[in-house]
Amino acid sequence: MFRRFAFLAAALIGALSIGVGAANAQGVIKIGAAAAKTGPLAGGAAITHWPNIKLWSTEVNARGGLKMKDGTRRKVEIIEYDDRTDPAETIKAVGRLATSDKVDFIIAPYATGLNLAAAPEFAKYGYPQIAMTSITDQTEMLAKRYPGIFFVLGRTTALAQSVADILAKMHKEGKIGNKVAMVNVADDFGIELAVAARPIFKKAGLEIVYDKSYPITTQDLSPIIKGAKAANPDAFVAWSYPPDTIGLTELAKIENLNVKAFYTAVGTAFAFYGQKFGKSVEGNLGAGGIDPDTKELKAYYAEHKKVTGQDADYWASPVTYAGLQVLEQAIEAVGSVDRKAVTAYIKTGTFHTVMGTWKFKNQEIMNYWTVGQWQNGVFYGVASTGMPGAKPVELKAGW
Amino acid sequence: MLFVYSVIPMEILISGLLLSANYALIAMGLTLQYGVARIMNLANGEMLVAGAFGGFWVSTVLHLNPYVALVFVVPGAFVFNWLAYRYLLRPLVRRAKNRGMLEVDSILATFGMSFALVGIMVAAFGGGFFTYSFLAVPFDIFGSTYGLNRVVGGAVAVAICALLYLGLNNTRTGMAVRAVAADPASAGLVAIDVPRMSAFAFSLGGAVTAAGGIMLSTFLTLDASSGVIFTMKALIIVIMGGVGDVRGAILAALILGLAETAVATLIDPGLTLAAAYLLFVLVLLFRPQGIYGRRAA
């Protein structure tokens, strides 16, 4: 019985691979994608990462595919792997995509840690790696080490610096005092930002009156909000992940943490943050932000909703899509799937994306949004490293 | 200063009790499954997440009170767990020569099941976060504020735990379940249908866990992969409390909830996990059979 089953399975796999081979001969460009579908980062990837891959491939194929040198168009086929938010799995999946699936390109994984883990693998097989959702201060060193890696979302210090600038400006204008309650999730992202923020805040003349971390699995965050409230701060800053961003916001509202500036990091830019809390999060600050009023982004948000059935976020979603546009435009400019030529083109070319015109400088985009704020139900960018269209920061007026 | 000292212990006590109630409900299901059916169910947390999806769905799609989901989540989880026990775990129980072998087999089988369940949930509900607002308003107890959703959740947890405790101690079925927990071989000798009681306890455990999921969904943001966090917590509580005794799980949950809240408030929230594991290690060192557990013969 088992033998017969095994035989059938083998026959089936054989038939399928012949099918794939036939499709390939017709000129499909195979693109691999290894990122989290399960595990701790799956929730974020389901909002920011996977829908954009679906949107992009759908749009490219609706146009007939990517334009090649000889004028023909080749459709894209996405091969997806779940890395279970496990760096070892990401590495394995990238290796499998390169050697066994023999894909033409690989879309970079989701989040900083997994991108850094996979970087040697991308380099080994000579694939360009446009890391759409990585934030790190080590971009220069990494770009030197890995000639095919590209950073687009920004640096850690810039994120912390922008928050400090906003609070220091409010303080200088006499709108708020200088006392800040700062908390962070005890995970690489939260720790790195808290460490970066401490000296920056101090230099900006801000006094950190409450400075605590919490484990990523904390079920009751109320002692943190109660503790922060007892320290009587003028501003609250949390280097947080989506579940605790939601939790801290809900508890701050319940406890009526009365600060004029309330900042939570990852997740604040998610559409459901605004939908869940409505008017009460008016004036809340968070990581990211964009200028959603540009023509390109308006079209992007409408299309994202139409194709994927869900709302894109107000930060990394359009940046992720822009990263895919870079890949698309580089392939079309080169006119083939020559990975070396495509990588070289990304380094020097100019790209027209939903985030505006992008030109890499040492494999890094230097203009990006750092802080956004919920204003009238939309998360607008209020601080950036040279992006146009920033809105002025407003004071938070209660919950 | 005097005011501060009088308010803070009260806050710790109430916040801690609310957290303990959550923990007790999370661990109660696993206590039944491990203590009675002898299945160390590592897919327990996935059941909880499935229940939480039920609450989310009722709240966001039907626009009803999420606790309405109890009506279909509890029977649904009961049936699902009964099927899982009957077709996946019973063969393991049958072939196991002793308890140790069953434990190893069931850990491996349910570990696999947890991956399958996560995959099914991602396929069915998507991998994204699910969150909604339910009674996210302040509730005043002795001059301090607490989220009403947490207070209601705590009350629901206490009610379910009390119901279980009374049921186990005052009904014939409850007595049979306790007999199987104490000694499956002897229970069989007094005309207790051990396989049936084990299946019942396993299914009931799954149903209780799913109910706990609904409660957690009213104030936590979860996704399909969150289950493992709760499996871990339940595991610690069950082993601390002593296998097979509901009172042990409740006491362990109480200790853990109060200790974590006290550490978070008085020392540093970053140390809550360390405090929980320290307590766990201490119990294992000085009472390896758990607080209420009996020493193995």
Image: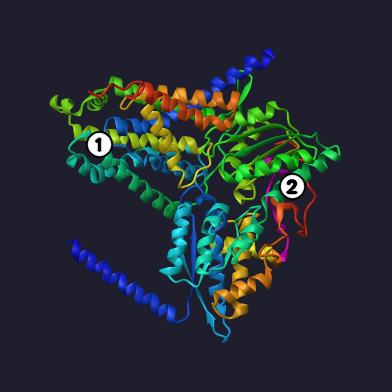
Chain at tag 1 = B
On the rendered structure, is A68 left or right of A233? left
Can residue A302 be seen here? The reply is: no
Chain at tag 2 = A
Q: Quadrant of the C terminus of chain B?
A: top left
Q: Which residue is mark 2?
A: A161
Q: Pick out the residue farthest to the right.
A: A173
Q: Residues within 10 Å of mark 1 (few under 14, many from 20)?
A: many
On the rendered structure, is A84 left or right of A48? left
Specify the amino acid type for callout 1.
Ala
Determine whether B111 is above or below B242 in the image: below
Q: How is the image coloured?
A: rainbow
Q: Secondary structure at mark 1?
A: helix
Q: Pick out the residue farthest to the top.
A: B2
Residue B43: x and y in percent read: 36, 42
Please tell me whether residue A294 belongs to the stretch shown in magenta.
Answer: yes
Residue A6: x and y in percent read: 23, 65
Q: Residues within 10 Å of mark 2 (few under 14, many from 20)?
A: some
Determine whether A168 is above or below A154 in the image: above
What range of the chain is rendered magenta?
A280-295
Q: Which residue is mark 1?
A: B199
Q: Quadrant of the N terminus of chain B?
A: top right
Residue A127: x and y in percent read: 53, 68
The dominant secondary structure in magenta is loop
Specify the amino acid type for callout 2.
Gln
Question: What residue do we see at 49% from left, 26% from top?
Answer: B257
Q: Pick out the residue farthest to the bottom.
A: A70
